[in-house]
Amino acid sequence: VDELLERVRQGNGRAIARLITQVENSVEVAGRAASALHAYSGDAHLVGITGPPGCGKSTLVNEVAKRIHDSGKRVGIIAVDPSSPFTGGALLGDRVRMADISTREGIFVRSMASRGTLGGLAAATSAVTKILDAAGFEMIIVETIGAGQAEVDIASIAHTILVIEAPGSGDGVQSIKAGILEIADILVVNKADRPGVENSVRALEAMLQFSRTSYSQNEPDSDHHSIGLTDDELMTVADDASLASGWAVPVLQTIAVDGTGIDKLVAVINEHLAFLRQSGEWQRREFERSRREIERLVEYRILSQLREAVSEDQRDALVTAVARRELDPYTAADALFNLARNGIDRE
Ligand SMILES: Nc1nc2c(ncn2[C@@H]2O[C@H](COP(=O)(O)OP(=O)(O)O)[C@@H](O)[C@H]2O)c(=O)[nH]1
Ligand SMILES: [Mg+2]
């Protein structure tokens, strides 16, 4: 493994692919790789791309990656697929599309699915990110589906978050559900060749305007109640770090299939990187990412200790009792915790 790690640090594509496979299959190798590589990571710009299935994320990632690569940088792409039934066929399409760029020297593409990933998809994604980072990739793009409901919380992985939309979904905004506006650094309406694009852009700009206004008017005597926001919602808006730190979230239009608007998008992504560096936001996000990374590992360890220390029969008996209303879930959790503790003490 040590020799493999050395070749990874030199940026050897084959070594990177092999290490990733080993990391996916062994929590022990994942730990060794992370310990050896962490100190050499931290330079890559991590860009998260999220949005509803079919809005054109993979096509867009492809175009962005090409341009970044043309500017002389090495680009890593991680396509995260939570293996939900409705995306089953998407990965194959992605592979075909990505085949075009993945043959380039200096572009590394990897698809990840939850099936067979030890330690969870989020942990595996962040391990792969670290490997590519230490291998000297200057930009790493992580594509995920959805936001709040996704297995991989993109906000805990990326520095710059792009939320992609496509026109023609009823009211013009499909994926703008709770929380997604708060995490977006750049909003993109892709498929700008389709009818309804103006509506989508207008709707998004209105929502952004609305949240900015709410933020600046966040005093007790302001009339925000007349626009239908509760105090809690206002707090959420006011907590938004992007707003507080002075980055105005732009709404861009692209046509990923013919490359329209991609140069502008790449310029804005680079502007956001400059903003992160100048404002101190980079360090804040690194702190947050590190905190989440540690918490994920601790969660995973506690859960695996629980599974080792308490037999499946014992766990199922407790679950059945809760389902039958013979026991409440809090008491069941207490019982599990005590059983686990006894099991661990005995070791
Ligand atoms: N008309 C149009 N189609 C696009 C555009 N971008 C992507 N598509 C098509 O939309 C479909 C889904 O694209 P894909 O990149 O796989 O979306 P993803 O599921 O978000 O990754 C593909 O058939 C693409 O060719 C665009 O700008 N305009
Ligand atoms: Mg895709």
Image (cartoon, rainbow, N blue to C red):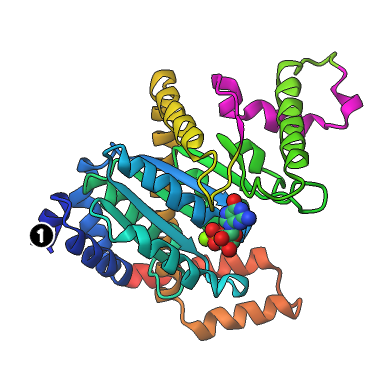
Q: Position of residue 176 (x, y in %)?
A: 71, 45
Q: Which of the 4 image quadrants contains residue 203?
A: top right
The one nearer the camera, 246 or 343, is 246
Residue wearing tag 1: 2
Instruction: Please provide the residue range marked out in magenta.
Output: 223-252
Residue sitting at the far left = 3
Q: Position of residue 140 (x, y in %)?
A: 36, 46
Q: Which of the 4 image quadrants contains residue 261?
A: top right
Q: Position of residue 138 (x, y in %)?
A: 29, 40
Question: Does 231 appear in magenta?
Answer: yes
Instruction: Sort mark 1 into few (<14), some (14-19) or many (20+) by Cα contacts within 10 Å.
Output: few
Question: Is residue 69 among what the camera can see?
Answer: yes
Q: Quadrant of the N terminus?
A: bottom left
- Amino acid type at circle 1 is Asp
Instruction: Please give left or right for residue 173 compared with residue 149 in the image.
Output: right
Give above or below for 265 relative to 145: above
Residue sitting at the far bottom = 313
Residue at 58%, 70% in the rendered image: 87
